[in-house]
Image (tube, rainbow, N blue to C red):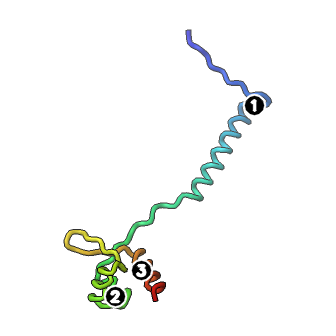
Amino acid sequence: MTEVKVTQVHNTTPQEFRENILSDFRTELESFSKNFLPKEQQEYLTRDEVASILKISMSTISDWNKKGILNPYRLGNTIRYKSNEIDQALISINKRY
């Protein structure tokens, strides 16, 4: 014999109950979609690109690497810099002087 499970909700029709659940679900879904931001793709720059952007020489880039002003990332035999870290480096340089 199969068991029948019954849930009773007083003062609400099945249609009203269904609409309440769907309304709450839609509200949560809208809230989630407004707050959801896709992860931003990181852009990596070469030494030449950084030198061009900052209008500095390659020797200055090497000097700033040693001083920790710039944070180089090695990818095989190449060196890359994160574009957002270049912006932060300029801010930190301006605070020093």
- Count of marks, rendered view: 3
54 left or right, relative to 7: left
For badge 3, the amino acid type reads Ala
Spot occupied by residue 30 in the image (x, y as percentages of width and height): 62, 53
Q: Mark 1 sits on what residue?
A: 13
Q: Mark 3 sits on what residue?
A: 89
Where residue 61 sits, quadrant-wise, is bottom left
Give residue 74's mark.
none
Instruction: Name the mark nearer the viewer: 3 or 1.
Output: 3
- Residues under labels 3 and 2: Cα distance? 15 Å
Question: In this view of the protein, which residue sits in the foreground, 9 or 72?
Answer: 72
Q: Of label 3 and label 2, which has the lower sequence position?
A: 2
Question: In this view of the protein, which residue sits in the foreground, 68 or 75?
Answer: 68
For badge 1, the amino acid type reads Thr
58 left or right, relative to 26: left
Identify which residue is drawn at 64% across, 48% down.
Answer: 26
Q: Is residue 7 above or below residue 39?
A: above
Q: Mark 2 sits on what residue?
A: 52
Secondary structure under tag 2 reads helix
- Residues under labels 2 and 1: Cα distance? 69 Å
For badge 2, the amino acid type reads Ser
Identify which residue is drawn at 70% across, 40% down.
Answer: 20
44 left or right, relative to 14: left
Identify which residue is drawn at 30% across, 91% down.
Answer: 57
Identify which residue is drawn at 59% across, 14% down.
Answer: 3
